Image (spheres, rainbow, N blue to C red):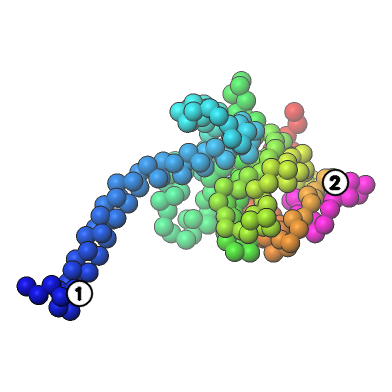
Amino acid sequence: MNINSNGYVLGFAVGVCVVISAALAVTANALKPAQDAAAEFDRQKNVMIACGLIQEGDPRPRKELEELFRKRVVEKVIDIRTGEVDQAKTPADLAAMRSPADRARYRAVAVAKDEQGKEDTFILPISGRGLWSTLYGYLALEHDANRVRGITFYKHGETPGLGGEVDNPNWKAQWRGKSILDEKNQLVSVTVKKGKVDPAIAREKEHMVDGLSGATITCNGVNKFVRSDLEAFRPYLSRYWTKKD
């Protein structure tokens, strides 16, 4: 066999590529369950961070945090046309939906309970386009479904130091205590202002947070999808807007 021939070299290269590709495919399939579990754990942590059950960088072991999530957080599927909880469906069913109509009709919401088992915080999934990517996160509302408890973004590809500052703890802290309803109980959302919030202006103090320097398109995207997602959950949230403590 002439190992210097073009045919041998080509055949050897193809053989190596096939072997390596097969090895990579097997490895990827073997690691997928672990990767999926890690992604789900990261999502659960972000739900708990948004509602204040844990802080970013919580040092507790994974098993303990997963148990905390099971004890204190319940996830429900909402029919956003009516605001009713669909008891027959689970978040796993939602993820498996293929019909665009069904995917548009149902959304998941997480509800955190206090130590006495009472509904304490509503954690809504939020997502939408920024400048370079789709941002995914959670917006947590207090038990009145009005005041913001917290916000977090767990997946995006925005520019570090600019739009990527949506991950900055100091910026996210500004959302806490903001109101999504005005004095007439109308949904106005929370807006990222272009510039600094003026605390002397009541509307800005209640419903706005500082803009991110050099990230106008990302901020505009956040404004758009946060408002859109709140509107989608309006039928569900509105039942709490009229409740009294």
Q: Is residue 81 visible?
A: no
For residue 179, side relative to residue 42 (left or right): right
What residue appears at the point 17 percent right and 72 percent down from the top-left corner?
11
For residue 112, side relative to residue 95 (left or right): right
Residue 98: give its label.
none
What residue appears at the point 69 percent right and 42 percent down from the top-left corner?
169
Decide which of tag 1 and tag 2 comes sooner along the chain: 1
Which residue lies under the disc numbered 2?
A: 205
What residue appears at the point 53 percent right and 57 percent down from the top-left corner?
104
Q: Position of residue 237 (x, y in %)?
A: 66, 43
Q: Considering only vertical position in the picture, is 30 above or below 20? A: above
* Image quarter of residue 113: top right
Disc 1 packing (10 Å; few <14; some 14–19; many ≥20): few
Q: Mark 1 and mark 2: span between their CA atoms?
A: 69 Å
Q: Is residue 198 magenta?
A: yes
Q: Is residue 88 visible?
A: yes
For residue 44, side relative to residue 185 (left or right): left
Residue 10: give its label.
1
What residue appears at the point 61 percent right and 21 percent down from the top-left corner?
115
Q: Amino acid at mark 1?
A: Leu
Q: Position of residue 229 (x, y in %)?
A: 63, 53
Task: Kindly report which numbered mark, 1 or 2, lies closer to the viewer in this rendering.
Answer: 1
